[in-house]
Amino acid sequence: MANETVGMVGPGRMGYAMLKHLIKKGYPVIVTDINADNVKRAEAAGAKSVADSAALGAASAFNIVAVGFDNEALEVTLGKNGLLSTMKPGGVIAICSTVAPETAQHIEAEAAKKGIDILDAPICRGGWAADEGSLLALFGCKDEVAKRAHPIFSTFSSDIVHVGDVGHGQVAKTMNNMLLWVNGIALMEAGRLAESTGIKLPKLREALLMSSGQSAALEDWDMITFTWALKDMQIVSKMADTKNITMPIAGAIKELVKQGKVMKQSGQVPDWTGNGKKKA
């Protein structure tokens, strides 16, 4: 059987890497993006393009949403020229963007009215993993949707975990990211304190990676940028407020990642890897 055509809204940093793997594995890919440069780059990689999300919905029954923010995800799915305006019953919209769980659930409720399934599928591990095809995809969806999506996502994901219903994929991604930023901020503080003693941080890192101080943030320190950290922590805060759950640590991290991003981008961070305090 021929591979299913895959549509993509937003072939940016992550989406472009994903579509290259799809094309390499023989999947026809159609894209749309408000950024003309992103479209040209996708076309150069072998994808076709259409004018907007409505045109994409008419051309493809399986569409990936890879935009940056909740309002964008809502617009390209539920908007006047969104995917749902043209997709036929039986289609699937995969939300790979990191959004609030209730955003994914709201889109699901509207999609259900038209017989379209939602795959809540945020992805983890960052750009380098997208390039290598070793992303982690967190599925929140019906079993039959997960089965349909598995071969598609396997082209760019080395690991796929079906964590529950629509919304649960976003919950898993949010908890993962919260713990990443907790560790990231802690590494800045621990690094400054350790450096003050004269110890060489790369040697300390070597030891910590063998012990209980090990973390993905420490292992991948050079690739941690804090670019999306504030957005992630804002989602955590919104979830906690909705459930009336007190989270003082998360609240502190939400404020600290603002400075963390500035420091990481300016190179004013502990040199855990020995590669220099270069701009991340």
Image (tube, rainbow, N blue to C red):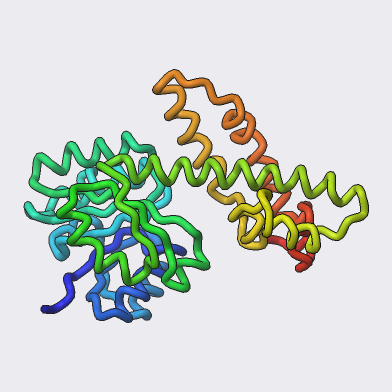
Residue 90 in percent (x, y) is at 8, 54
Q: How many marks?
A: 0
Residue 54 in percent (x, y) is at 19, 55
Answer left or right for 274 relative to 244: right
Q: Which residue is painted at 64% across and 30% down in the image?
A: 252
Q: Residue at the far top: name it.
A: 244
Location of residue 218 by image quarter: bottom right
Q: Which residue is painted at 67% across and 37% down in the image?
A: 256
Q: Quadrant of the C terminus?
A: bottom right
Residue 19 in percent (x, y) is at 34, 71
Q: Can residue 50 be seen at all in this image of the molecule?
A: no
Q: Can residue 164 be seen at all in this image of the molecule?
A: yes
Would you place residue 200 above or below residue 112 in this image?
below
Of residue 93 and residue 50, the one placed in the foreground of this image is 93
Would you place residue 88 above or below residue 40 in this image?
above
Q: Quadrant of the N terminus?
A: bottom left
Q: Residue at the far front: name it.
A: 211
Answer left or right for 137 relative to 151: right
Residue 251 in percent (x, y) is at 59, 28
Q: Which residue is painted at 49% across and 29% down in the image?
A: 237
Answer left or right for 195 relative to 262: right
Q: Which residue is painted at 34% across and 59% down in the image?
A: 160
Would you place residue 135 above or below residue 45 in this image?
above
